[in-house]
Amino acid sequence: MQPAIVFPLHDPDGSMFPHLETINPQLKSVFAHAFLGISPITEQKQSERVRRLKEEGFFQLSTCKPNSLVGEQFVSTYWHAATASPPLQVLHLCFPDRVAFALQSKHKEQFIADVKVVEAAHTPLLFQRSDAAWRTHPKNYAETERMAIRVGEMLIGKSFDWTWCHLAVQAQQLREILPHVRCRDMTVLAEIVFWLKDRLQTKDVDWLAWEDPYLYARDADELRRERENTVLETRKRLSYVIPVIQFLYESIKA
């Protein structure tokens, strides 16, 4: 059984749609379906592009409720995929920008190979950023997100990327945990890992390298320096890392 790919799509300015159109043939060759959770404003602003996606049998679209928080959009998208798929269907929960980068970069073949090798028995499997992948990110990205990793290590003795980018899970496993998920911001990612932690396997990969230079057609070193030297960017990273650390502190008991 081919896996399915699952991700929310918030793209009111239409910057991600050209990438989706480019990688569409590759997605269809690797995945059985693509479950997309469309934000209401994206459906409104990009109505023609959304209509074209709906016409393709490959894309299974759901629309998130108006005024939904980001975590609610994630849960809505994941719930649609989990309930519309056979129990043993492997679902790859990810982000469109990360996948677009992986499939349009030197990492393409390894990404496809890593996805294809995952079977139901291998799940849940968290793909984590390798040391090489972390080195491509701005230091303030890596240092803040690794704070959460370190806190988790101290509390449970295991190293998980709580602000993850790619998780392979069976549909039935996802159905089991989603009713327990309460977070409605980006902390929802950490909460999903929390509910899977006792059976979660991990694999470090280079294809989770920093995607922004490619997506914005910028020189990587120049863009990295810009991001590293702005307090606003550091505060942005802390705005979701601090709630994750607070969630871990409150949820993981001795």
Image: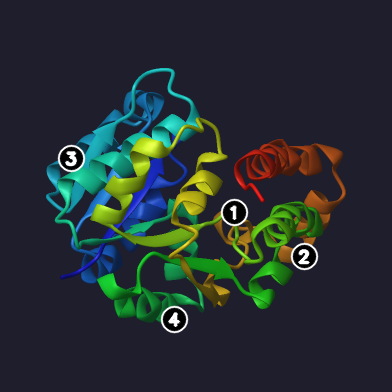
Q: Residue at x 85, y 43 (%)?
A: 230
Cα–Cα gap, marks 4 and 2: 24 Å
Q: Position of residue 39 (x, y in %)?
A: 38, 30
Q: Are marks 2 and 1 in contact (CB under 8 Å)?
A: no
Foreground: disc 4 or disc 2: 4
- Mark 1: amino acid: Trp
* Residue tagged 2: 221
**Residue 12 visible in rendering:** no
- Count of labels in the image: 4
115 left or right, relative to 227: left
* Residue tagged 4: 110
Cα–Cα gap, marks 3 and 4: 30 Å
Label placed on residue 54: 3
Q: Secondary structure at mark 4?
A: helix
* Residue tagged 1: 162
Foreground: disc 2 or disc 1: 1
Marked residue nearer the N-terminal end (3 or 1): 3
How busy is the neighbourhood of tag 2: few (under 14 within 10 Å), some, or many (20 plus)? Answer: few
Q: Is residue 96 above or below residue 74?
A: below
Residue 61: name its quadrant: top left
